[in-house]
Amino acid sequence: MPVSAPPTGPPLSRRRWIALGVVLSAAFMDNVDATILGIALPRIQRDLGAGHTAAQWSLAGYALAFALLLITGGRLGDIFGRRRLFLIGVAGFTAASVACGAAMTPEALVAGRLAQGAMAALMVPQVMSVIVTMFAPAERTLAFSLLGAVLSAGSVSAPLLGGLLTEYDVLGTGWRAIFYVNVPVGILAFCAALRFMPETRSDRPLRLDLTGVALVTLATLGIMYPLVQGPAEGLPAWTFAVTAGGVAVLGLFVVQQRRRHRRDGSALVPPTLFRRRSFTAGVVVVLLVFSGVTSFFLVLTYQLQSGLGWTPLRTALVTLAWPVGITATTHLALRHGAAHGRRLIGAGALTMAAGTLVMIACVRVLGAGLAWPHVAAAELVVGLGMGLCVPILTGVVLGDVPPDDAGAGSGVVNTGIQFGTAAGITVVGAVFFALVTAGTGDLADRFGAATATALWCNVGVFVLAALLSPLLPAPSPAEP
């Protein structure tokens, strides 16, 4: 997609790095909020009197709204101006954070999280656009490296930040501080963007595919809503009818996308991307990996806090073993990813399966005697696997995509990450909470049995991702 040329001259030279810092702060805020809720969720559930269904929606709703509007948010920036969309997204995200912090009912919290995800989908795509339009090609490597560092910092700090804010009852706000902390960051980012971020837009933007957005939204809700809501109501007949309707609408979406692409090339998801078996397999691997990772930590958080009575801070501290593992193997993935990407992704997925098996064994054997060294060991192994595959996964999946389709392909892969996150929370979470509710014995026994069974789903997901990894794009012959 053609983009307007980056402005030139002294003003840009002085301001572009500040503008980059502004958009990176928003990316950090989004990355933290996507995961920070997990550590505090058991306490939030108790304080608001929420059921397991509302707890799942408060997590999955953010990722789902983000996924549904991510590509649309990028195109709106191309059409109406990227600074304008960024400002709207930051302002909306900050307001939604206030709404989440002030929520007095589970429904209000879920609504606030959906709004956060939708606003994140408006501001986050503009981060990439700022890098492309404001920096010369030779400088983009540093800019993208800074983006990667910021996103990594967000992933590492979110659990610890959530535990600290919840445990120490900052200004008497309790868990609500995990949302209120966004307010000063959002205000500073908004004011700095007004001052330092120039307006850019595409010279020939694609038209909005509103029909495609509506169809994929209906299809996704039709499939996911019964998975979350159905078990709580005993899987009545309507859940199967709504699921079938969601699948049918998904079929309509595929047909509509093909027609839209033939007519003017502005399909939300270009069908030509999926003519490549390697890309299709790659999107499936992305869905599997991220659904497994997010659901693993959801199940583990409830096991530790609700099953064993751990505090949010203790849970957050033991979770630090996970980024330690990621850091230990990321350099291997980045160094050898170009030549051995498929093998590293397969090895990483199998390593995550092994870490999950370690966790299952610890839960089954130790029961209420589960302690931090056991949990840390399992999380360390999962982190080692993540470090081998996640940093290079997007690049490998896009390996066979022509340059002209790279933007669309990247949008599809990033959307797949969010859909995978929502699907993992929805499906594995439904299994876990159904088993907790139906289980017998004391609290620790019920949660332990449910955790071990649900985590077997994660093992299957990781193994399937490893089995599909040979279908990913092969390295170029020119690569070593």
Image (cartoon, grey):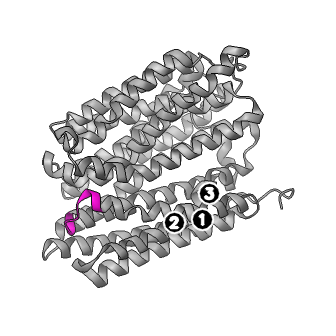
Q: Give the residue at x 49% y 76%.
A: 354
- Residue type, mark 1 in image: Thr
Query: For the residues marked 1 and 3, what is the alpha-carbon distance in whole angstroms?
Result: 24 Å
**Lateral position of residue 82 relative to residue 418, left or right:** right
Residue 479 occupies which quadrant of the picture? bottom right
Q: Residues within 10 Å of mark 2 (few under 14, many from 20)?
A: many
Say the numbered circle drawn on residue 325: 2
Label drawn at residue 281: 3
Q: Residue 260: x and y, percent?
A: 60, 29
Look at the picture and state if 97 lies above or below 87: below
The tag earlier along the polypeptide, 2 or 3, is 3
Whether residues under marks 2 and 3 lie with C-beta atoms below 8 angstroms apart, the answer is no
Q: Is residue 7 left or right of residue 445?
A: right
Mark 2 or mark 3, which is nearer to you? 2
Which amino acid lies under the numbered mark 2 shown in the image of this protein? Answer: Gly
The answer to whether one can see residue 237 in this image is no
* Front position in the image: 232 or 367: 367
Gap between marks 2 and 1 measured at Cα: 7 Å
In magenta, the rendered stretch is 306-314
Mark 2 touching mark 1, by CB under 8 A? yes
Query: In the image, residue 437 lies at what x, y percent?
Result: 17, 65
